[in-house]
Amino acid sequence: MRRAWLVAVGLVVVQAAMAAPLIKFNFENGLATWDKIGAAKPLTVQTKMAHEGNALECVYTVDKQAPVAGVGVLVAPRLGEAKSVRFWLRTTKMAVISVALKETDGSQYQTLLTSPADAWSEVDLGVDRFRLAPGNKDENSTLDLEQVNWLGVMDITKVMPGLKSADGERTLWLDDFSVDSDPSVSAYSPDGKLPFILDNFSGNFVPYVAFDGTLTHDKQDGALVWQYTGDKPEGAMNFIFATLGPLPAKGPTHLLITLSATRATQLFVVMQEEAREGRDESRYSTVIGVPASPDFKTYTVPLKDMTLVTADGGTDENGRLDVDQVSALVIGDLEVLNGQQPGPNKIFIDEVQLFAAK
């Protein structure tokens, strides 16, 4: 599967080289219309820290009074053919980054990723990963690309519930930003049909957020690596999660996930429905026993077998997992959650997908 996918990636790269970007900013001729967000100094273009040539530099301060900062740009609403958003990103601190697209009526859609400290990430996002941001309303709850007139890249680490982040000054660098009409390597599905590849980690960035430990991208294996100490008290948050774009209401029957671990691990996997328009933030879970082994193993979970999480009072208005309402995928260590303190661990995730069993 991996070898075949790499061949496909090669085709995508060739297509990317041929397709002209819908919009592109390489900052060789200045900032264009980019502007700061939050408590930031005036933006600059510099060469000292750049992926190639020039890069935009944003120096900002985050605290309780101004917890969000970053950069944004106004664009002409002409992105109806967009399939991908690409850029290079670097931050001085580990940061949870919101990449946002805003329609002319103010409706904002976003997807989240992690920027490791002091390392360049080559971000390549399929537009199908964007979901209506919390607190936003849209008349059709659909990202209308032809109406997008603003794009933003923001550090939202301080507003993530339960995620500790020190106040202070940070720097963000952005380079080679483009919106393209060719498919992203991280697109769920090129034609909107199953299977939906939620992640195969072939892009050189981290599309998950960790609430314990650290996340890195293993370029050689094309895998996500989650490392943590496993010594937290009972009830401590020990999980990673990914925000999900819209998923199909009908068709998916199974969740597939390919994993390995450095110690035997009981992993809980949760599909979380979105709390919007009076619906509950219902969560459905399963547990996967992963042996200690360097070899990847693929697990398939029937969606009908995932059970509603009720231990914390969770409910669901219709008592079933509605895949089209799922907005996040959560993966955690059950033994750490239960306070067993099983010790250090590394989880390697190679692929996550939704598919229909034949």
Image (tube, rainbow, N blue to C red):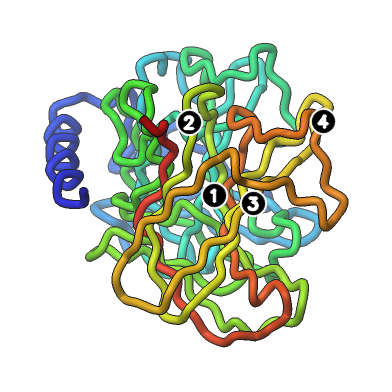
Residue type at mark 4?
Answer: Glu
- What residue is at 70 percent from the left and 68 percent from the top? 237
Badge 2 local density, few (<14 within 10 Å), some, or many (20+)?
Answer: many
Is residue 159 shown to the viewer in this render?
A: yes
Q: Earlier in the sequence, mark 4 or mark 1?
A: 1
Res 242 label:
1
Q: Are marks 3 and 4 in contact (CB under 8 Å)?
A: no
Q: Which residue lies under the disc numbered 4?
A: 317
Q: Provide residue 352's location: percent of width, then percent of height.
A: 41, 48
- What residue is at 69 percent from the left and 82 percent from the top? 232
Q: Nearer the viewer, mark 1 or mark 2?
A: 2
Question: Considering only vertical position in the picture, is 269 above or below 336?
Answer: above
Q: Provide residue 11's location: percent of width, then percent of height.
A: 13, 35
Q: Earlier in the sequence, mark 2 or mark 4?
A: 2
Q: Which residue lies under the disc numbered 3?
A: 285
Residue type at mark 2?
Answer: Pro
Distance (Cα) linking label 3 and label 2:
16 Å
- What residue is at 43 percent from the left and 30 percent from the top? 127
Residue type at mark 3?
Answer: Ser
Distance (Cα) linking label 1 and label 3:
15 Å
